[in-house]
């Protein structure tokens, strides 16, 4: 009885109208935002300012390796962006990560669809299997691809028997190997958001569609696909952005001719110790990604991106 | 020795799986699995890492030493470094031994800001390669060694005493030296390789890997063109060497330009012929499952490099670091280390001690270099900051472009 009473009381409590939000806690939202904003300010905005000021520095005349002085040399941007050595890997980054994103979508969408609609009691197991690779280090998994694609490995061996690959030829290191690595490594980032949106699709909508004589494909095109768009947008962004800045795959699975922008930045930083050029490249990469994402989200629409 | 962090991580993993003579005999019946577990991220390193958080390093009885991986005698069974343990017992110092140097560039990137602002790097003793030591001395990051505390320094091989970047060895003592030469898979290339030009044989197309360390690869190529790289050279001579490299990369003769990772390429047959480091190749040959690998200096000469013990100016325990240097210049101790690492030993008298440990190794010209071998090897000339930046950039444009 007492319990019922208590429950009744709570329900009663909830029924009383909440106090006017305008009066209570005008500052609460800002207070709640504070930790996040501080974090962004300290770990994003401030370093960005430093990075920008570095990008405008010039070497000290006759100075040591890595010794620069603060100037406002915007010429750094012009010099870097007109140099084939720098802009080629920048384009290459976007091409590689673009292809990898499309491939990941082509593989990830059917996979997510299968898990969401057709897996029955295997669903949880399949989801774990999508995530399972994360239990092993990113680096190790990429290195494993080296073994898979190696000249003495199974894949090349088979291709050699068929005659597609010559005696001393191979597929690692190459652009193909780098894109394979990128696709593989970012596949879960594509699959999971798509699964999350597909899972929320009400199957009755599809049933209703077929009751109204929609062919299965029409049903997919008009119902499932639009409803899964938030997942597709999130998935493509989560794949494309980190893939464009990735350097591990190109480092481990490619040659210098497959260098992406990350590799170039790393080389400038550690070997040449040309910090301004490194900063310019980082900034340009960030700007390019920002513009691309903006255009993409505008076109596809971010309204349902929840 | 190599330049990219991921490569080194991988090498570290691979090396842990690799067994060496000394290690095998020590691990004995415990088997490979136990050996792997022991070698992995060894618990001693973990302890060192955790205790470094405490201000223990400021106490005068602790010495923190940064070295490369697999660069000190190690006993898998007890997970300890026998020579280091003996030093601790004899001297009363505690040594935190950290395998923190993966490659010179990234190690320098980590500690230079601290040195620049006069803060402690946390290390009392570090072991970088020649070019970085030279830079540190120039920039004033290396402390002058008080040789009164290092009586065994008299055992340093005379050939090592006068290097251009540290005349009279005021700031550094050699830890180990090694050779850069040609290595090949003997199953695939039974005749072996004799010159750098042999690498460009059309039969090896796509099976050649060269090092991403500029001084090594450019050193060997320029030597093959008759340039003495131990002396200052001209931009034209460098360009001529670079042209060869560019041509071989463009034609696909050179498959990849790699750091430590070239070892993996040799192991799995990805590469048949490489430019490589002496000790590495001998270690590979201790693995009976692999084909045997040959190593030789090219007829036109090979490169000789060293890693050196240096005390940073901001070290907390300079006297302790000097005591440690002194200990490892005892010929008996040096021989024990050399028997394990297989690189060239810088200590006079170690050879006699090696006779007692392993007579076969005492006869190895790669551990105890003969005069003939030393005549064939060259130490890369020290470069000015401007030259270094320029050459690294030009080398990068060819190998990374």
Image (cartoon, coloured by chain):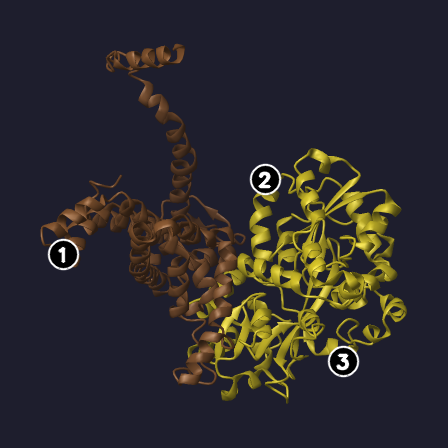
Compared with residue B181, is residue B176 higher up or lower down, i.e. above or below? above
Number of the label disc, if any, that sits on residue B117: 2
Chain in yellow, by letter, is: B
Q: Residues within 10 Å of mark 3 (few under 14, many from 20)?
A: few
Label pair 2/1, CB-CB below 8 angstroms: no
Q: Is residue B233 visible?
A: no
Q: Are marks 1 and 3 on the same chain?
A: no
Number of the label disc, if any, that sits on residue A27: none
Residue displayed at 45% across by 77% down: A156
- The Cα–Cα distance between marks 1 and 3, rounded to whole angstroms, is 81 Å
Number of the label disc, if any, that sits on residue B372: 3
Given residues B241 and A6, the one toward you in this image is A6
Q: Nearer the viewer, mark 2 or mark 1?
A: 1
Q: Chain of mark 1?
A: A
Mark 3 or mark 2, earlier in chain: 2
For numbered disc 1, what is the local secondary structure? helix
For numbered disc 2, what is the local secondary structure? loop
Give chain A's shade. Answer: brown
Given residues B349 and B10, the one toward you in this image is B10
Residue displayed at 17% across by 48% down: A207
Given residues A263 and B321, the one toward you in this image is A263
Q: Are marks 3 and 2 on the same chain?
A: yes
Q: Chain of mark 3?
A: B
Q: Residue A271: where, in percent of width, then height? A: 51, 58
Compared with residue B67, is residue B60 higher up or lower down, i.e. above or below? above
Q: Is residue B108 visible?
A: yes
Q: Residue B12: where, in percent of width, then height? A: 62, 59
Label pair 1/3, CB-CB below 8 angstroms: no
Q: Residues within 10 Å of mark 1 (few under 14, many from 20)?
A: some
Compared with residue B8, is residue A21 higher up or lower down, i.e. above or below? above
Residue with the mark numbered 1: A218
Q: Residue B369: where, in percent of width, then height? A: 77, 74
């Amino acid at each position: 009885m007492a319990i019922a009473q208590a429950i009744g009381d709570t329900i009663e409590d909830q029924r009383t109208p909440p106090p006017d939000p305008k009066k209570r806690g005008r500052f609460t939202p800002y207070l709640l935002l504070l930790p996040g904003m501080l974090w962004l300010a300290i770990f994003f905005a401030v370093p960005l300012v430093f990075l920008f000021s570095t990008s405008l520095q010039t070497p000290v005349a006759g100075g040591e390796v890595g010794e620069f002085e603060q100037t406002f040399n915007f010429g750094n941007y012009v010099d870097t962006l007109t140099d084939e050595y720098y802009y080629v890997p920048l384009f290459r980054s976007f091409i590689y990560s673009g292809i990898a994103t499309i491939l990941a979508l082509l593989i990830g969408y059917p996979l997510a669809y299968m898990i969401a609609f057709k897996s029955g009691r295997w669903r949880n197991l399949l989801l774990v299997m999508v995530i399972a690779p994360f239990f092993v280090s990113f680096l190790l998994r990429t290195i494993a691809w080296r073994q898979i694609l190696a000249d003495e490995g199974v894949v090349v061996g088979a291709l050699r028997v068929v005659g597609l690959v010559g005696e001393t030829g191979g597929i690692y290191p190459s652009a193909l190997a780098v894109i394979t690595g990128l696709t593989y490594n970012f596949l879960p980032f594509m699959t999971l958001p798509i699964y999350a949106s597909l899972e929320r699709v009400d199957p009755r909508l599809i049933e209703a569609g077929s009751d109204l004589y929609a062919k299965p494909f029409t049903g997919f095109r008009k119902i499932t696909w639009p409803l899964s768009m938030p997942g597709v947008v999130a998935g493509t962004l989560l794949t494309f952005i980190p893939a464009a800045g990735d350097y591990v795959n190109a480092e481990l699975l490619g040659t210098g001719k497959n260098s992406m922008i990350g590799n170039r930045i790393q080389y400038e930083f550690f070997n040449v110790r040309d910090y301004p050029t490194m900063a310019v490249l980082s900034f340009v990469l960030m700007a390019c990604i920002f513009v691309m994402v903006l255009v993409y989200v505008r076109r596809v629409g971010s309204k349902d991106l929840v | 020795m190599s330049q990219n962090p991921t490569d080194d991580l991988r090498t570290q993993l691979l090396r842990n799986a690799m067994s060496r003579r000394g290690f095998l005999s020590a691990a004995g019946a415990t088997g490979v699995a136990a050996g792997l577990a022991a070698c992995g991220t060894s618990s001693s390193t973990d302890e060192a890492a955790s205790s470094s958080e405490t201000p223990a390093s400021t106490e005068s009885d602790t010495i923190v030493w940064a070295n490369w991986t697999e660069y000190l005698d190690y006993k898998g069974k007890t997970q300890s470094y026998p020579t280091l343990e003996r030093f601790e017992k004899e001297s009363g110092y505690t040594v935190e031994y950290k395998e923190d140097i993966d490659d010179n560039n990234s190690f320098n990137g980590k500690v230079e800001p601290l040195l620049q602002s006069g803060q402690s790097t946390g290390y009392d003793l570090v072991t970088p390669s020649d070019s970085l030591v030279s830079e540190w001395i120039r920039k004033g990051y290396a402390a002058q060694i008080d040789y009164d505390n290092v009586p065994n320094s008299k055992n340093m091989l005379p050939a090592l005493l006068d290097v251009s970047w540290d005349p009279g060895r005021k700031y550094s003592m050699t830890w180990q030296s090694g050779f850069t030469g040609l290595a090949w898979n003997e199953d695939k290339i039974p005749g072996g390789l004799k010159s750098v030009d042999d690498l460009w044989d059309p039969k090896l197309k796509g099976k050649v890997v060269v090092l991403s360390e500029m001084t090594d690869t450019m050193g060997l190529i320029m030597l093959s063109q008759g340039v003495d790289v131990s002396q200052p050279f001209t931009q034209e001579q460098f360009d001529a060497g670079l042209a060869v490299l560019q041509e071989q990369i463009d034609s696909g003769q050179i498959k990849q330009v790699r750091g430590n990772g070239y070892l993996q390429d040799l192991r799995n047959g990805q590469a048949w012929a490489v430019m490589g480091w002496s000790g590495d190749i001998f270690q590979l040959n201790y693995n009976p499952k692999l084909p045997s690998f040959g190593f030789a200096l090219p007829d036109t000469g090979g490169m000789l490099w060293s890693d050196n013990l240096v005390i940073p100016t901001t070290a907390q325990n300079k006297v302790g670091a000097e005591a440690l240097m002194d200990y490892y210049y005892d010929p008996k101790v040096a021989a024990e280390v050399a028997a394990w690492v297989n690189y060239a030993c810088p200590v006079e008298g170690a050879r006699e001690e090696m006779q007692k440990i392993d007579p076969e190794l005492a006869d190895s010209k790669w551990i105890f270099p003969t005069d003939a071998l030393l005549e064939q090897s060259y130490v890369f000339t020290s470069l000015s900051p401007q030259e270094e930046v320029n050459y690294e950039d030009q080398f990068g444009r060819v190998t990374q472009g």
